[in-house]
Amino acid sequence: MMDIHQILKQLPHRYPFLLVDRVLSIEKGISIKALKNVTINEPFFEGHFPHRPVMPGVLMLEALAQAAALLAFDALGTSPSDEMVYYFAGIDGARFKRPVGPGDQLILEVELLRMKAGIFKFKGRALVDNQLAVEAELTCAMRAIA
């Protein structure tokens, strides 16, 4: 388990771009289960869409990538630093299965498929009420800042 205070120590993201509220479980080097509470106060709902608020798919993918970063840092036993940056490097097979709106709780499930030379490959999916909302394979890279 990891609360918001621990998450803030591990991720450089801040409001309105921090998209992980809590880590429910983490199996070192294997998988993570986290959550994002989706509220009507999210800034993107003002324009997406005013008459029928829907969480943008790219932000659901970003939430999965942030959960993946937490898994990667835990697997390596490290934390981000001013000399290191964690990039979102690729998305494969993204499929959106249901809209996500205010009041939903997005459960983020990410599995580490492989890591080599600072490149990480993950399989991620997000669910609402045990229904698949999005799934994708994510590639992320950890690189030193030159």
Image (cartoon, rainbow, N blue to C red):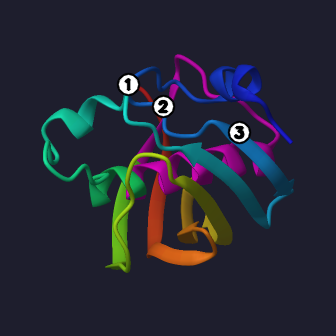
Total marks shown come to 3
Q: Is residue 70 above or below residue 65?
A: above
In which quadrant of the rendered view does residue 36 lie? top right
Residue at 46%, 21% (x, y): give it.
Answer: 14
Mark identifier at residue 18: 2
Residue 82 image point, x, y percent: 53, 16
Callout 2: few (<14), some (14-19), or many (20+) C-alpha neighbours within 10 Å? some
Distance, label 1 to label 3, CA atoms, is 16 Å
First in sequence: mark 1 vs mark 3: 1
Which amino acid lies under the numbered mark 1 shown in the image of this protein? Pro
* Picture quarter with the C terminus: top left
Is residue 117 visible from the viewing direction of this image? no
Q: In terms of secondary structure, where does tag 2 sit? A: loop
Magenta-drawn stretch contains 79: yes
Callouts 1 and 2 close, C-beta under 8 Å = yes
Mark identifier at residue 16: 1
Query: Which segment did they paint magenta?
Result: 61-87
Query: Residue 124 vs residue 100: left or right?
Result: right
Mark identifier at residue 74: none
Residue at 52%, 21% (x, y): give it.
Answer: 83
Which amino acid lies under the numbered mark 2 shown in the image of this protein? Leu
- Taking depth in this image into account, of 43 and 125 the one nearest to the observer is 43
Disc 3: which residue: 22
Residue at 51%, 53% (x, y): give it.
Answer: 104
Residue 10 image point, x, y percent: 67, 28
Magenta-drawn stretch contains 145: no
Residue 6 image point, x, y percent: 76, 25
